[in-house]
Amino acid sequence: MKETNYQYIIAGAGAAGLSLAIHMIESGLSNDKRILIIDKTTKNENDRTWCFWETGKGKFEECVIQQWEQVSFISPKFHKKINLLPYRYKMIRGIDFYEYCKNKISKHQNITIVQENIVAIYAEGKVKTVKEEYNGQFIFNSTQINKTKDGRYHQLLQHFKGWLIETEEETFDTSAATLMDFTIEQKNECRFMYELPLSKTKALIEFTLFSESLLKEEEYEHELIDYISKKHPQLKYRITEKEFGIIPMTDQPFNAYEGGKIIHIGTAGGATKASTGYTFQFIQKQCDAIIECLKNTTSFEEINQIKPRRFYFYDRVFLRVLREKKEPAFKIFTDLFSRLPDSLPFKFLAEETTLMEDVRVLRSFNKSLFAGAAIRQEITKKLIKPVQ
Ligand SMILES: Cc1cc2nc3c(=O)[nH]c(=O)nc-3n(C[C@H](O)[C@H](O)[C@H](O)COP(=O)(O)OP(=O)(O)OC[C@H]3O[C@@H](n4cnc5c(N)ncnc54)[C@H](O)[C@@H]3O)c2cc1C
């Protein structure tokens, strides 16, 4: 008879689900537990590339295919190569991560992975798939089941199209990744390019927007062609992979724990930073917190507290500033990167700064712009109306 009772059920085997499984294995927590991992897909495709910054060696260091100590920031009147140390900007291909995790998991007979479509998750500890009903002492959910958008909050999108290109000539400078290049037409939006060199002849080039609605597919492609031809005139290249992504940028609260037996993880558990879309590094912090709760049998409420409250406020105000469009987005980022010591903006965006450092970062921005947005944000609180 098929086993349907587990101590832990991990619903969704993406970045958060598989990270949590690895954190459980490495902490020894999984040793005496029966764990079930459910995903509707096989995770056999390179469906995304993660970039993030961290100090030292991370848990998934073996999957890192490239890392940079320097990143470039480029805007119309300002260009800076930023020394990131003690951070390094790292890149992991989805497929390498999935294979690495699945390989580790396969060495543990008490962990089962099934490919099934989940149709419902119940607070009392049940997961219903199209084939089966499973019971778990705790369910760690990274699917979007039961998640709906709430119009009272800012709902921006980070959307992007990336091409992995290969060239015959040596073209790219591998010493630095271009994190944001704003020297493209802004069209009254926040639009920039990434150029992430994997070698002198291979780079991931990505056209990214922070805005309220998507473009037509050909518009992303047109911008990529235009950028490559201007930055690297006459370059002959072939596209070897394509990536398209949408990351929610919202201040809508997605608590990891709201009682019962379900703990939400990853984007579903609020791990996506509203103002940047970066998630991977916050997933790792969330996993650390879950492991601590499980080890010490403390309340999962603690997972809701890992992000200092003030960072929610900064993100919310930043989303308002972006939506109100009183100043071009590239100017805001130019202030951030031109007025502060190299790695401080990254420490701030990783939510690792002290209050004193926050003050220094906040002073780098246009004060009246941000103060005005902060006041309007406080006044409207949860009754956000569409920006006119
Ligand atoms: C293309 C792309 C690129 C990104 N790049 C970066 C980046 O560079 N840096 C960064 O920090 N963040 C990045 N992100 C944002 C974020 O890190 C990723 O979205 C990350 O994968 C989120 O992890 P997650 O586990 O919450 O969601 P996912 O990784 O999407 O995992 C959710 C899993 O649940 C499964 N699932 C969903 N519904 C069901 C169901 N009904 N039944 C069974 N299984 C289900 C899915 O198949 C999936 O495997 C990117 C996102 C995208 C889309």
Image (spheres, rainbow, N blue to C red):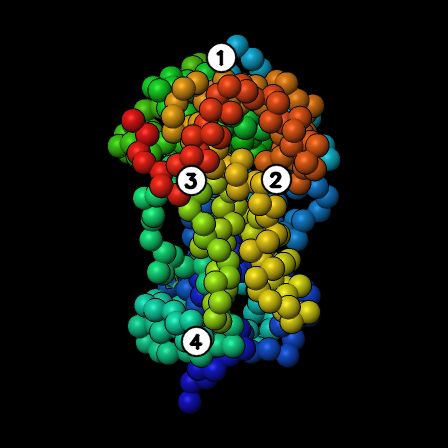
| Structural crowding at the residue carrying mark 3, measured as other residues with C-alpha within 10 Å and reported as few (<14), some (14–19) or many (≥20) | few
| Structural crowding at the residue carrying mark 4, measured as other residues with C-alpha within 10 Å and reported as few (<14), some (14–19) or many (≥20) | some
> On the image, numbered disc 1 is attached to which residue?
76
Q: CA distance from mark 1 to mark 3?
A: 35 Å
Lateral position of residue 187 relative to residue 9, left or right: left
> On the image, numbered disc 3 is attached to which residue?
381
The residue nearer to you, when weighing 249 against 20, is 249
CB at disc 2 and ligand 1 closer than 8 Å: no
Q: CA distance from mark 1 to mark 4?
A: 55 Å
Helix, strand or loop status at disc 1: loop
Q: The disc labelled 4 sits on which kind of residue?
A: Glu
Residue ranking furthest to the front? 379
Residue 325 locus on image (x, y percent): 39, 22
Q: Are marks 1 and 3 in contact (CB under 8 Å)?
A: no
Q: CA distance from mark 2 to mark 4?
A: 34 Å
Name the quarter where the N terminus is drawn: bottom left
> On the image, numbered disc 4 is attached to which residue?
124
Helix, strand or loop status at disc 2: loop
Residue 199 showing in the rendered view: yes
**Figure check: 268 above or below 87:** below
The residue nearer to you, when weighing 36 against 139, is 139
